[in-house]
Structures are given as structure tokens and as C-alpha cells.
Image: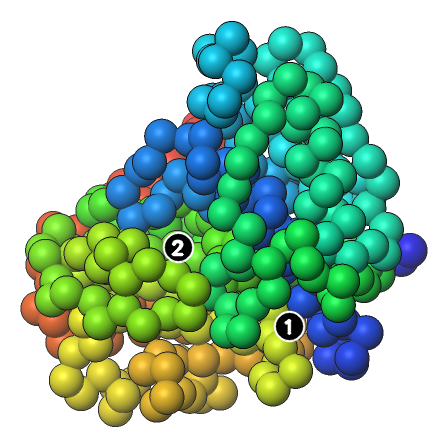
Amino acid sequence: MTNTPHNTWPTLPSDDAWFDTIETFHLWSQVIGKIRMVNAVWVNHSWSVPLYVAPQGLRTSLVPYSGPNTARHGEAFELTFDLIDHRLELTTSARTRLGFDLEPMTVASFYDRVMALMTDAELPVTINTTPNEIADAIDFPDDTTHQHYDRDHIHTLWQALIQTDRVFTRFRADYWGKASPVHFFWGSFDMAVTRFSGRTAPPHPGGVPNFPDDVSREAYSHEVTSCGFWPGNRAAPPMFYAYAYPTPDGYADATVAPDEAFWLADLGEFALPYAVVRAASDPDAMLLEFVESAHVAAADLLGWDRELLECHAPFGADWWRNRAAG
């Protein structure tokens, strides 16, 4: 495996082998994410369900156990995709550490092994086995179709997530108002960060495949601007995106930088190819310009009180960095 410098945006493949692995890992991540979801206390806008970028891969963060073994309530655990040593690791507050190697295997086999891992730790769980946000989905125990795992490809995806997490966190820091963590949603398989105006929004129409409409409506119960990174599929390359809910009139015609950004009418969002950002002389600056300009355009059209909600100066991310440096 080629080591990627920590400050380098990696090249993302676009061949069939890349998407074979992405599709399989997407489903594996749903198994892990659903275990977190059924145990964690629900937090508004589904903030209790995502995964997070970690120094060694992707993790659930600390999850309080609330499953059928009531004798173990009060304990906690974390599940981690270690994408350096390529293992799934379960760590519990009862000092249990279990895991298995990540290698090519069917989704059905991965599901069985994860469930056995939780049982061996005396933390048995039951999850809904139908994948979310995927049309014509195959239940996890029956999926012998998706079985690809390329270590280099997954390592490369993780490196891209590290870079994206860093820039999105910088974007989040310049906001006084309510803002989400930077988190990785296993349903849609993308990294996102969201800003809120504090005002309620019209009910979301729902209609997402294998996803409850009431969850969609709760997620979009308030006005938002949101941006994210999506690693692509066989029909489209990896992209950064930005949108608003509700979509304000005139948003499609707004000026959003850089020039390479474009409007996707079928999705109602702006997009910027990952490859364009990676090739830029300053990828961080280009990505920040994209997400900030998309936010400003939507916030102005929606009439947000930006002076109240934003904090570029004197208290934004640069202020804290300079203060900490003395």
C-alpha cells in the first residue's frame, strides 16, 4: 500500500473495482450504523446514528448498550473499521476487545460475523436487516452478491474523508447558530455538515427508498443549508455538493464559486467534482469557497440573519487559532 502524505488529497479511482468495493463497504457500514442506532439515545436530525472519521478509519463513537441483555445495561461499546490494519474492532467498557479481519466476504457473511461478535461480548443486538436509502435492496442475511473489498481503495477513501473532515470542520467553526457535527451517514454513504437558521421549514415530501417519511420530515423540520462529500457511483464520479432546504426561488441561478461548480436540477443542489478540488493549487481554499458561497447564496435568498448567525470575525476559527497561539 502506498502511504499518502497527511496533507495530500488522494486520487480517487473510478473503475469497476472501486465501485465494487464502495458498494460492499456501504452495506457493511449500514450493519455497523444500525447497531449504533438501535442502542443510542435518539438525537434530533438523526445525529445519533452516523459514523465518524477516526485516526485509524471510521468509528461509531461511544454507544451505550440498551439491547436484550439487560444485565449489561450501563455498559458501553464502540465499533471501529480499522482501515490501517483492516479489521473490524469491538471495544467495550467491560474491557472486552474482539474483532476480525476485513477481507473480501459477502454482506451476509459480514452480518453474521458482526452479530456473533456482539453476542460473544454478551451484548447481543437485533437490527432491521433491510438496507436504507437503496432501491431494490437485498436484506443483509440474504446478500451474497456484494463481496468485494480492496484494501487500497478503502484506504484511499478514508484518506479523502480525513481531508474533507478537516475542511468541513473549519467551515462549521465560522457559525454561531446551530450546526451539525461533521459526520458520515451510512444510509446515503456521504459525509455532511449542516447549518440551521432556527426557523421551521415546510414538511419534507419524503419518498426516499427504504427510509421512513417521518424520519425525513424530522431531519428537515427546520431550514438548513448543507454541504457534503459523496464518493460516487457507476453513473457519476465523486462529488462535493451543497443544497438548501427548502430550496429558495432563484437558487439555481445563484453565483456559486468556483467556475467549475454546476447546478444539478434533478437533485436540486450544486456540485463540484472531487477531481477538480484535488487538482487545484489550493484544494482547501477551493472547497471552502464552494461551500461558503453556496451557503451565502441560499441564506441570502431565504432571508437568514447572517450577521447574527455567522462568526467569521472576531470569534471564528481563525480567532481561536490565533488566540491559542498567543
Amino acid carrying mark 2 in the image: Val
Who's the residue at 68% across and 58% down the image?
142
Q: How many marks?
A: 2
Q: Nearer the viewer, residue 41 or 136?
A: 136
Between the C-alphas of marks 1 and 2, the distance is 20 Å
Who's the residue at 60% across and 21% down the image?
123
Mark 2, other Cα within 10 Å: few <14 / some 14–19 / many ≥20? many
Who's the residue at 33% across and 59% down the image?
212
Q: Is residue 32 above or below residue 219?
A: above
Mark 1, other Cα within 10 Å: few <14 / some 14–19 / many ≥20? some
Residue 12 place in picture, x, y as percent: 72, 71
Q: Is residue 194 above or below residue 122?
A: below
User: Secondary structure under badge 1?
Assistant: helix
Amino acid carrying mark 1 in the image: Arg
Mark linked to residue 278: 1
Query: Position of 325 compared to 250: left or right?
Result: right
Residue 253 place in picture, x, y as percent: 25, 91
Residue 140 place in picture, x, y as percent: 64, 54
Mark linked to residue 193: 2
Can see residue 153?
no
**Mark 1 / mark 2, whichever is N-terminal:** 2
Query: Position of 57 compared to 251: left or right?
Result: right
State the scheme by which the image is colored. Answer: rainbow
Q: Nearer the viewer, residue 147 or 155?
A: 147
